[in-house]
Each structure stands twice: as structure tokens, then as C-alpha cells.
Amino acid sequence: MPAFRIVVAAHGELASGFVTAARLICGEMDHVRAVGLEPGDSPESFAERLSEACGDPEQPLLILTDLVGGTPHNVAMAVVRRRSSAFLVSGANLAVLVEAATSMDALDADAVERLVAAGRAALCDAASLAASRSS
Amino acid sequence: MTLKLVRVDDRLIHGQVVAIWLKALGARRIVVVDDRTANDEFLREILVLAAPPGVPVEVHGLETGTERVRELAADPEPVFVLMRSPLTAVHLREAGVEFPLLNVGGIGAGPGRKPLYRNISASPEEIAAMRRLEEMGTKVELRIVENDRPVQFASVKV
């Protein structure tokens, strides 16, 4: 299990959906939390729940968000800026979450770069994937 | 008069709601009058991030905000003014800042609060504030998003 907490912050049930989906692949994940932006939420009320889910500000933290510029992402930026060892990856997909949740690496800029690369590799036109396999 | 709209919404700037209002109104600046946000650096930051890109956001407490809104009302730049409560609107109005309409777009429910219309509830003080605004010649409409049909506060049974 990684030595850092992971919080998925996303619109609606996508956050808990990501975590439920990752659990099918990784099993139980005590270090992963989900915070969804609900109808009726303000940036402020979402910030309260997100801050609580992020836990001890001294501990390393990775936040994954669904969409750059969305409220979960904007609030996460403000949270990350106030912590000493926190990183934020936006536009995360299930590949990023699975990679992060099963990572044994220390959380640093290099590790985050590898996570982003894993996410990018997982986003592709399947036609090109099939073509590269048949050639 | 270039206060394009004075709006009460206890969520202040949120999601696409403000973006759509701004576009419809042609407003190019947001002024938030709210003591709590003005005094909290974290809240200020998330509020500013919540605004559409390129739209400047000013956050002021009640007193400085009242003066700033007065100043902007005389400026040609179209402005969108946001606050959490009709009590703030009454404060502005009583300080001599004139606006013909107050839009009430969202005040959450809670103990001691009476549901008025959809997601809009009000405390007795807020209901009194809206009545006071009407007496001073500011119409109060209940209207959540820009393309909703406005409901006049005066026509709602409270």
C-alpha cells in the first residue's frame, strides 16, 4: 500500500464511482477517499468536505480530479497550495487511480509525472491500438 | 446605472450559473459583498477560481463593498454584484446605492427558515428585508437561472 493518501475529487457520483471501480481491480483501499460535488454544493461547502477527506496536512497527499476548471479541480488547487507535500493530477482516468493506488513509490514530482504518463497511455483511439498490434 | 444585476445567492459564484448570467447580461466584472469571504483568504481564493476566466472578481466586506458598489454604479463598465443575503441588499439600499431590481437566486433551507420558492428559503429577518426593499422601490424577483421565468417576491405567500 502506498505511503500517501489519495483523494478523488469529481463531479457527482463520478468520484465514488472511480473508487468503486478501482476496488474491483485493486481490492480494498483504505488510503483512498472520494469526494463528489453534489447538486446544491457551493465551492465553499465542497471545500469543507474535501479538506476533511485530505486529512493531516503534514502527510503526503495526491488529489485526482476529473476536469480542469471544474469546481472540484479549482477547490483542490487551493487545498494543494496550502499543504507542504501535496500533488494534483487533473483529468484523471481509472488507469491513473489504479497506478497510484498500487504504487510503492514515494510521492514526488517524478512519481506524479509517471502517473500522468500512465493516464495518457491509457487514453487512445482503439483503432490505432489494433493497428499497432496487427502490424 | 451599470449595475447589471444585484443578486442574492448564498453559494455566491458556483458552477456554470454565474457564467450564464454574465453572458446574458454582458457584465464584465463580478463584485462580491460578503464579510465572511472578505476575511478568509482560502474562501477568497476558491471564489476567484470559480469565476469564468478573464472576468475580474472583487471581494469586499460590507462597508468597503457598499462604497465600491456605489462607485461602480456610476462607472460605464457593466458589473454583476453578488451577496449571500437580502440583508446586505438592504444595507446597500439604505446607504443610498440605488438599483431597481434585486434578483434572489438561492438561499438554503435551515432551522427557522421558511421555504419560499424552489431552492429559496428565508428567515423572518430576510423576509422583512425583502419587504423593506420593495417599500424603497427595489423590486425583488425570485429567479434561479437566467432562463427561468422570474417570480415576483410580492406575489409569493409568506
Image: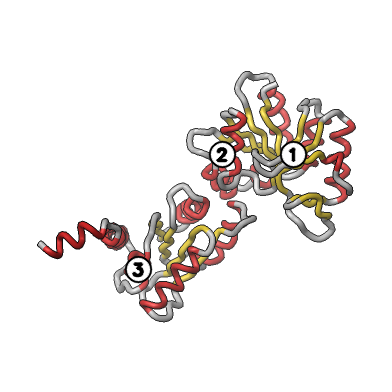
At label 1, counting other C-alpha atoms closer than 10 Å, the crowd grade (few under 14, some 14-19, many 20 or more) is some
**Viewer-side label of 2, 3:** 2
The numbered mark, 1 or 2, whose residue comes first in the sequence reads 2
Please, is residue B38 above or below residue A59 in the view?
above
Judge left or right: residue B96 versus residue B40.
right
How far across and how far down the image is residue B86, in percent?
Answer: 78, 41
The residue indicated by pointer 2 is B19
- Chain under disc 2: B
Q: Do labels 1 and 3 share a chain?
A: no
Residue pictured at 46% horizontal, 64% vertical: A8
Amino acid type at circle 3 is Ala
The residue indicated by pointer 1 is B150
Mark seen at residue A100: 3
Residue pictured at 75% horizontal, 44% vertical: B85
Kind of element beneath mark 1 = loop
Q: Foreground residue, A33 or A105?
A: A33
Please, is residue B153 above or below residue A44 in the view?
above
Name the quadrant of the N terminus of chain A: bottom left
How far across and how far down the image is residue A68, in percent?
Answer: 43, 49
- Chain under disc 1: B
> What is the distance, in whole Å, between disc 2 and disc 3 at their CAs?
34 Å
How far across and how far down the image is residue B39, in percent?
Answer: 65, 45
